[in-house]
Amino acid sequence: MASDDELRLAARVEVCVTLRVYAELGYEWGTAGHITVRDPVDPGLFWVNPLGVPFRLTRASDIVLVDGTGAVLSGRHRIAGFAAQHSVHRARPDNNAVVHVHSPWGFMWSSSPAPLEPLDDDSAAIHGLQAVSLDLSEDAGEALGDEARILIRKAHGFLTVGATLAEASWYLMVAERAARAQLVLERHGRREWVSEPWLSRWRLTPEFAAEEFAQHGDYVRAACPEIWE
């Protein structure tokens, strides 16, 4: 059985893995972007990515431990954006991870937010898993509701949740691709929904979402062994 320290190290490494995958995908934008994971030992605490450390250079020792108020309990870096993340953790205790980055296509789509239509395999995978918030002052946890995994926030891109960070990370990647596809297809006047039975068959489950992200995470672990430092 893993010790508390081993469980916590694994949680911090998971945050680094997602950050590095997102850096390669071009989702990093200045100091923007927040990832929080519930502590595997004390569910009232959270691991948060550090402010000002480049995604592609983040190591386990950089990840910050905070309490529910955002007070830093362990770590040498500052954090930002925790209040909105924590509102989601509080509203959805079934989910252990919350992800928000300033990905380019997601931000374009959120300028006039609406659920992404099931126009291809990617967007069909998240059909029925989306919620929309038209007011940035709205509590993110309340806006997400009880079932959605992806929140599209007015002028502020995507926020995703999952029982695991791998699950939440994949939802954001799928939403980003779906936003790009729909914006391009709309530009060319092409929009046709995926029909049944494929619409139901292609919808992501938490397990499949985590599995899909796994190969990206495995690559980072193999290519970047320093993340464990």
Image: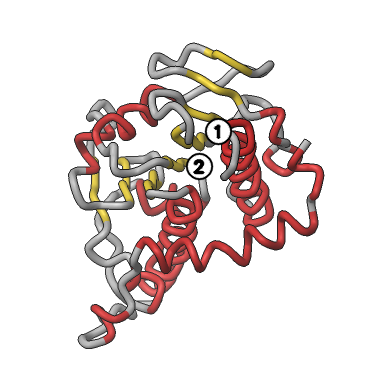
Task: Give the SS element for disc 1.
Answer: loop
* Relative image position of residue 179 (x, y in whole percent): 41, 62
Q: Amino acid at mark 1?
A: Ala
Quarter of the rendering containing residue 227? top right
Vertical position of residue 222 compared to residue 36: above or below: below
* Relative image position of residue 114 (x, y in whole percent): 25, 54
Say whether residue 103 is left or right of residue 111.
right
Q: Quadrant of the N terminus?
A: top right
Q: Mark 1 sits on what residue?
A: 32
Furthest toward the front, the residue is 1
Query: For this rendering, which residue is in front, 89 or 176?
Result: 89
Of the numbered discs 1 and 2, the one sitting upstream in the chain is 1
Query: For this rendering, which residue is in front, 219 or 109?
Result: 219
Give the residue drawn at x 38%, y 22%.
83
Give the residue drawn at x 36%, y 27%.
86
Say whether residue 117 is left or right of residue 55.
left
* Badge number at residue 75: none
* Relative image position of residue 43 (x, y in whole percent): 40, 29
Task: Give the SS element for disc 2.
Answer: loop
Query: For this rendering, which residue is in front, 40 or 15?
Result: 40
Coloration mode = secondary structure
Vertical position of residue 102 compared to residue 118: above or below: above
Quarter of the rendering containing residue 49? top right
Cβ–Cβ under 8 Å for marks 1 and 2:
yes
Q: Mark 2 sits on what residue?
A: 101
Q: Amino acid at mark 2?
A: Val
Per the model, the C-alpha gap separating discs 1 and 2 is 7 Å
